[in-house]
Image (spheres, rainbow, N blue to C red):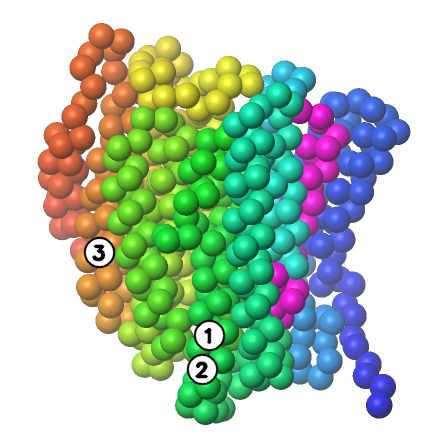
Amino acid sequence: MSVVQSVDNVALLPAYLAAGTAVLVLLVDLLAARAAATVAVAALGAAGTALGAALVGAAGERRTFCVGADCSWLWTGRAALVAVVIALLTLGVLALSGPLLRAGRIPVGEYCFLLACAMTGGVVLGAAGDLITLVVALETLTLPLYVLVGLRRGSLAGAEAAVTFFVVSVVATTITLLGAALLYAVTGSLHLDRLGAAFGADREGLLDLPLSTVAVALVVAGLAFKVAAVPFHAWAPATYDGAPLPVAAYLSTASKLGGVVALLAVVQRALPADVTGPVLALLAVLTMTVGNLVALRQRRTVRLLAWSSVAQAGYILAPLGALALVGGRTADARAGAYAAAVAYAVFFVLLELAAFAAVVALRPADGDGATLADLRGAARRHPWVGGAFALALIGLAGLPPGLAGLFAKVTVVRALLAGHAGWLALVVALNAVLGLAYYLRVAATLYAAPGEVAVRPARIVVVALGVATALAVVLGFAPQLVLDVAAR
């Protein structure tokens, strides 16, 4: 029996643009051998990919590689958003990489080619409709980063970071593929929607099989490595600190966004929420708490941002964990939890990129992030860059005037409350106060005079508690007002 598979080339246009960028970069580097031309082609390709993804997304939902009702490529509004953000992050990292590339310790052609390849994986990831496409796209996003981390010539720290990242990622991918193979053995399908339908039609029968439980646990655990969720997080601080600063920025933003999108896809569409929910809720609590507590003790800038990134992953996972309590209550509550996770991830990666951009601007062209002591008084010497860094930190902390971070945290808390996960909302709020301590400490260091005594963390915690109490009164009313205005 022959099977006819439909192909919609318009739906595939963003992937064509991203992959075409990688090929063009390779050709320009080979034929022209001019660094400026290579970087220009990569930047134009990233901008063109973002524009193409937005235009295709605006035309409505499109599906391709379909056999019957099962499609391996679903271009929806969320897929377009992910592709646009990934392409813009790639463009931003290229802009940050100028001083590093001019220093001459990194080959420009290989650097731009690998970034374009990673961008291609991120673009495909958001539209993946089956587990194989999902895992291949995630690895296409991740594999170039192994090389980028250790690409700097003569850097022992970069080589060690690359090996650490490679070994951990290979283990995570193996675990995910094993879980996918077991899911196929149990259900006979790898398409996400078909898996969800199988668990919905025979939930009790499938979950009574030990193989099903093991399969679900392996898939969730493998993807948890990608978002650096505790206890699968140990690779992140060492890898970020050993990588060149722009590459660390890409790891902390595009790579993490890819892991969140992959985890969201399997939790929302394929796996039973009442099974994955408790696991994700526990991971969220551990991740945000451990990340914030360890970040309080950090003295190196990039390591602090890395542990902050771990904690932020906990906030992203929290709405997904709330699905255990939401269960089958209301479709609106489930949709709100998914939307909150996506919104927080997007706001976080933009603010994180801004923070790394400030560190790049404040450090030597080929330098690392150094220590917080090296940044003392930086905002006095460089008011605009220091002010941007402080604003990014305040946004990550969720304080005004960093309204993006503030709105993102409020969105998460409201989604948890709507899902009757009040205890998890309380944990998020308490961890947000912990986060204020080290974010404000770094901001205070930026504006400190060279001879001033460092601000004590305990004093900052007391101030943070006062600020958080005052904000709690305001935020009890502000989010609903914002949402009501948006609804009109």
Image quarter (top left, top right, bottom left or bottom right) of the N terminus: bottom right
Three-letter residue code for mark 1: Val
The residue wearing badge 3 is 427
Instruction: Give the image quarter of residue 69.
Output: bottom right
Q: Mark 2 = which residue?
A: 210
Q: How far from the left and from the top, in percent, is residue 201?
A: 49, 91
- Res 393 → quadrant: top left
- How many residues crowd mark 2 within 10 Å: few (<14), some (14–19), many (20+)? few
Closer-to-camera residue (465/62): 465
Q: Which tag is nearer the camera, tag 3 or tag 1?
A: 1
Q: Is residue 122 magenta?
A: yes
Element under disc 2: helix
Q: Which residue has dot 1 on it? A: 214
Q: From the image, state whether disc 3 or disc 2 is nearer to you.
A: 2
Which SS class for mark 3?
helix
Whole-angstrom CA distance, mark 3 to mark 1, is 28 Å
| Amino acid at pointer 3 | Val
Image location (x, y in percent) of residue 482? 31, 55
Q: CA distance from mark 3 to mark 2?
A: 32 Å
Q: Nearer the viewer, residue 254 or 43?
A: 254
Up the image or down, 190 lies above or below 76; here it is below
Q: Are marks 1 and 2 in contact (CB under 8 Å)?
A: yes
Relative vertical location of residue 345 with respect to residue 243 in this rendering, above or below = below
Q: Amino acid at mark 2?
A: Pro
Q: Secondary structure at mark 1?
A: helix
User: In front here: 453 or 400?
Assistant: 453
- Region rendered in magenta: 106-135
Marked residue nearer the N-terminal end (3 or 1): 1
